[in-house]
Amino acid sequence: MCTACPPIPRATDTDRISAFEQRLVGAFNDGALMLMTSVGHRTGLFDTMAGMTPATSQAIASRAGLDERYVREWLGAMVCARVIEHDGVSGTYVLPAEHAARLTRAADANMAVVAQFFAVLGGVEDDIVACFRNGGGVPYQRFGRFHEVMAEESGQTVLPALTTAILPLVSGLIGRLERGIQVLDLGCGRGRAILQLAEAFPNSSFRGMDLSGDAIAWARTQAEARGLENATFEVRDLSDFDRTAPQGRFDLVTTFDAVHDQAKPANMLKGIRRALGPDGVYIAQDIKGSSEHSKNLDAPLGSFFYTISCMHCMTVSLAQGGDGLGAMWGRELAEQMFREAGFGTVEVHELEHDIQNYYYVCKA
């Protein structure tokens, strides 16, 4: 017993205790499932099994080029989670087609990609606990694969919808890109959006900026490999962008899930307004939610995003001596900050393919 801790209130509703206990038991299993789902994605096991008839663990391991003993234990976790089906008589396993439709690289929505966040963020738990006690933050460099996973995730929410749903939010923008304009993407990560747009619109010029040197190096390598002379990338801290942004240089500025983890998000937004020309437009994708905790109770991924915020978005900002805005800054505060940055018109859009983000269109 903790002698320094105050006594807990006497719990009298035994049914409520039991229900909460069962919820936690389910959460233990679901948390374990996320780790094993990440492993299944990274090893290609889901992709391998999607193309197989019922097979033994040895056959699955052989097809995937993996160690059978590890595959067999992984299969046990997947069977208990009712993701993979097992025939005890024949000793074979099969991934149902309906499950493969959400767990493989060939699927239109691969939810196994998102499962990787749990392992990535778990790797900095000790650092986060230290921040709870001492303040401060955890720098980008501690997050290993975060940019890789973010690039893979944006490959599902941003890239397929760029020219079909996101850019068409601004009337006439596709035509302007075809004729040739100047485009800036801030917090570009590995620059996959810039690379895709540079290929699609060779008459336009594209520039990406991000704090991560590793992510920018990857983007530059890709641009060179694809021969994209209209795409350039720069390692850049945007904390002083309100003063250093080139005046009126760009026709379009974009941020994809990139405002809330900046050290000084208000400065970045003011810099975006400064960088836009007279007919310029700013498109921002950011997390769908409210600025108030109680209004996020029905958000489909509320707890998930608060967790990612606490263990990445907020803490990397605080590590730079920043504001620690956090991923769940919410629509109310977002609209307020866009207007305070100098945007007179702020439109808020929701897209059918994306349940987790708002798309803001901001103009002077």
Image (tube, rainbow, N blue to C red):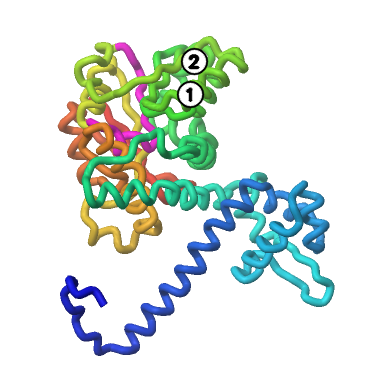
Residue 141, position as x, y percentages in the image: 40, 33
Residue 113, position as x, y percentages in the image: 55, 47
| Nearer to us in this view, 188 or 17 | 17
Q: Tag 2: Cα neighbours inside 10 Å, few (<14), some, or many (≥20)?
A: many
Q: Which mark is residue 337?
A: none
Task: Give the SS element for disc 1.
Answer: helix
User: Does any portion of residue 161 appear in the rendered image?
Assistant: no
| Nearer to us in this view, 188 or 338 | 188
Range of residues picked out in magenta: 249-264
148 horizontally vs 259: left or right: right
176 horizontally vs 107: left or right: left
Contact, CB < 8 Å: mark 1 with mark 2?
Answer: yes
Task: Determine the residue positioned at 18% across, 33% down.
Answer: 339
Q: Tag 1: Cα neighbours inside 10 Å, few (<14), some, or many (≥20)?
A: many
Residue 9, position as x, y percentages in the image: 19, 81
Amino acid type indicated by mark 2: Ala
Task: Determine the residue positioned at 74% across, 52% down.
Answer: 67
Q: Is residue 125 above or below residue 10?
A: above
| Nearer to us in this view, 258 or 159 | 258
Q: Is residue 54 magenta?
A: no
User: Which residue corresponds to mark 2?
Assistant: 231
Between the C-alphas of marks 1 and 2, the distance is: 7 Å
Q: Which mark is residue 194?
A: 1
Amino acid type indicated by mark 1: Ile
